[in-house]
């Protein structure tokens, strides 16, 4: 298995940072090659100190870290990557699995000459970080999961009948699979961007950051239509992978420091979702609050924190996220926890 890194030819190579006191901050785009030949897009945010690898959520890209990464780079060596099937990384010929994502993380770190790094992930990326903590004991000394809980188990939905929840979760997964990789005409791109920017405005997220993320996720079908990666097939594979992982079973067995953050504010309403969805999510939030509190009480390697934000916490509260991660990393790596 070979890995390599080479300078990318993207327009953002050498992009200046926009946040934090590090006025000389510059990021460089790289391409790393995974063991199966898939090219993985990486943004090296520079810095020095304990290395941190930032991983985005499902349907997102490394652009989500543009506000938090420069802040972290004042005290850490910081990389961000596009997961395969996302952004400018390749798809590969095999199904998307967490095991494959873990090997991609290893490939990126090896290609960039980083022997050890704390993996910090948001949403799906947080779930990847947990798997890295398990599988890469020689590489990942600690991990951070920022609101990466998936849809959980029916028993976690407090106050609701588990069988009813199971049926609703199957419906929600089907809807997500149908939405994944949905093609649209090029003329509709302005509307797609406008919708995303509008939601961002409600949460205080800069419009340019949200638009850059949408444009990085764009891909073209064989007949010239557009879609946002991941494509239809990989979107289904992602849903299957997330449904099949027992996070709390893994949390109870971690042997190295893990920070788990949960959003304290509900997500804004999403047009078109079924009427039962909000009640379902409210019950899940209560279940997560209960289960995470119990986990923090019984598992000494786990730290649980709340963030005053919605699920989009990395984009909404970059300063708070950077402080949270930096404080945890300092304690975890230096043995101060």
Image (cartoon, grey):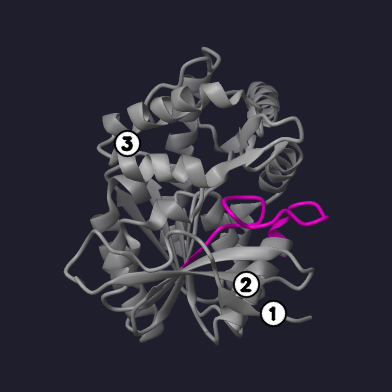
On the image, the x and y values in percent for residue 55 come to 51, 60
**SS for dot 1:** loop
- Residue drawn at 54 percent across, 32 percent down: 157
Q: Which residues are magenta?
A: 80-99
Front-most of 218 and 69?
218
* Image quadrant in which the C terminus is located: bottom left
Residue at 56% across / 58% down in the picture? Answer: 82
Q: Earlier in the sequence, mark 3 or mark 1?
A: 1
What secondary structure do most residues of the magenta stretch adopt? loop
Q: Residue 263 shows which numbered tag?
A: none
Q: Residues within 10 Å of mark 1 (few under 14, many from 20)?
A: some
- Residue bearing the label numbered 2: 32
Residue at 27% over, 44% down: 308
Does residue 266 appear anywhere in the picture?
A: no
Q: Position of residue 278 (x, y in %)?
A: 46, 21
The quadrant of the picture occupied by the N terminus is bottom right
Of residue 271 and residue 289, the one placed in the foreground of this image is 271
* Magenta run includes residue 98: yes
Residue found at the far left of this picture: 21
Which residue does the numbered mark 3 point to in the structure image?
265
Around disc 2, counting alpha carbons within 10 Å, would you say few (fewer than 14), some (14 to 19), or many (20 or more)? many
Q: Nearer the viewer, residue 244 or 302?
A: 244
For residue 153, side relative to residue 7 (left or right): right
| Residue picked out by circle 1 | 3
Residue 201, image quadrant = top left
Mark 2 lies on a secondary structure that is strand
Distance CA(mark 3)–CA(mark 1) = 41 Å
| Within-10-Å neighbours for mark 3: few <14, some 14–19, many 20+ | some
């Amino acid at each position: 298995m070979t890995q390599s890194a080479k300078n990318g030819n993207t327009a953002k190579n050498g992009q200046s940072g926009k946040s934090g006191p590090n006025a000389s901050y510059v990021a460089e785009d790289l391409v790393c090659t995974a063991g199966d030949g898939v090219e993985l897009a990486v943004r090296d945010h520079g810095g020095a100190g304990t290395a941190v690898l930032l991983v985005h959520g499902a349907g997102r890209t490394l652009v989500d870290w543009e506000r938090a990464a420069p802040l972290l780079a004042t005290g850490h060596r910081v990389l961000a990557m596009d997961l395969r099937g996302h952004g400018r990384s390749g798809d590969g010929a095999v199904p998307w699995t967490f095991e494959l994502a873990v090997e991609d993380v290893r490939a990126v770190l090896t290609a960039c000459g980083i022997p050890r790094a704390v993996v910090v992930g948001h949403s799906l990326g947080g779930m990847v970080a947990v798997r890295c903590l398990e599988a890469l004991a020689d590489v990942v000394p600690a991990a951070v999961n920022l609101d990466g809980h998936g849809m959980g188990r029916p028993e976690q939905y407090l106050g609701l009948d588990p069988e009813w929840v199971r049926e609703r979760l199957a419906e929600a997964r089907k809807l997500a699979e149908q939405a994944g990789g949905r093609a649209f005409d090029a003329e509709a791109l302005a509307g797609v961007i406008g919708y995303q920017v509008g939601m961002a405005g409600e949460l205080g997220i800069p419009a340019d950051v949200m638009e850059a993320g949408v444009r990085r996720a764009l891909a073209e079908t064989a007949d010239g239509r557009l879609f946002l990666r991941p494509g239809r097939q990989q979107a289904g594979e992602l849903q299957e992978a997330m449904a099949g992982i027992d996070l709390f079973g893994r949390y109870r067995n971690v042997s190295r420091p893990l920070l788990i953050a949960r959003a304290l504010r509900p997500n804004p309403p999403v047009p078109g979702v079924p009427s039962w969805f909000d009640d379902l999510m409210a019950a899940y939030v209560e279940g997560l609050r209960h289960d995470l509190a119990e986990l923090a009480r019984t598992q000494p390697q786990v730290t649980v924190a709340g963030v005053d934000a919605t699920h989009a916490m990395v984009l909404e509260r970059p300063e708070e996220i950077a402080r949270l991660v930096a404080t945890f990393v300092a304690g975890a790596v230096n043995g101060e926890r």
